[in-house]
Image: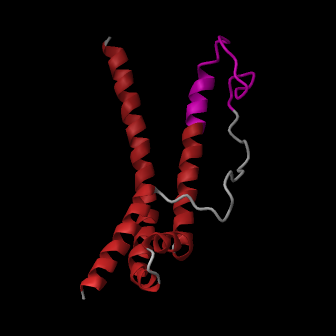
Amino acid sequence: MKRIFMVSATMFVAMVSAQFASVQAQTASMNAAEACISSNAADVEATTDDLSRATDFLLTYVCASELKVLEKEQAAYDKEARAKKLERHCQGQKDGSASSMFCGDNAEYFTSFGDYNWTEDNVITVPSELKSYAAKKLLQLRLKRKAN
């Protein structure tokens, strides 16, 4: 029982450590996206009356390159996580108890399904926290401007 707990605890620590490393790597690109939003929000807010359109314009066009970097980092992290999950799955198949189309004869795993981009190149997936940040920033600027 004690051994099972130690193995479980070790696996949990490894999983949390991997997620923490991902968060650290994404922090720099997330900070760059937030900086882009902060530095351009006032100009965008001043050019349109519709805050929804201003938010979309800010995220889709003005800060697109920063958000694309963040999206690529997240995609790489997701691909690595899928590969690790598949490796564990295939290692469990070594005894021949089950088969999988993703595991080879010696329980090696296939991870190269190509780097196909399942979204269009001009479509950027914006994390919800950045959408919220941009919308709040634009709203604060609008309220401040209207108060003056």
Picture residue at 42% right of the left edge, 85% below the top: 46
Picture residue at 59% right of the left edge, 25% below the top: 89
Give residue 83's position: percent from left, percent from top: 60, 37
| Relative depth, front residue between 86 and 138 | 138
Is 109 drawn above or below residue 145 in the view shown? above
Give residue 137's position: percent from left, percent from top: 35, 72
| Relative depth, front residue between 147 and 40 | 147
Q: Quadrant of the N terminus?
A: top left
Quadrant of the rendered structure where residue 24 is?
bottom left
Task: Indicate yes or no whether the magenta region holds residue 90.
Answer: yes
Task: Indicate yes or no whether the magenta region holds residue 43.
Answer: no
Is 8 drawn above or below residue 47 in the view shown? above
Picture residue at 36% right of the left edge, 34% below the top: 13
Type of secondary structure dominating the magenta stretch: loop
Give residue 3's position: percent from left, percent from top: 35, 15
Q: Quadrant of the C terminus?
A: bottom left
Picture residue at 27% right of the left edge, 81% below the top: 144
Quadrant of the rendered structure where residue 30 is?
bottom left
Is 38 drawn above or below residue 87 in the view shown? below
Question: Which stretch is magenta?
Answer: 83-109
Name the colouring of the figure.
secondary structure
Give residue 65's position: percent from left, percent from top: 56, 71
| Relative depth, front residue between 132 and 71 | 132
- The count of marks equals 0
Quadrant of the rendered structure where residue 107 is?
top right
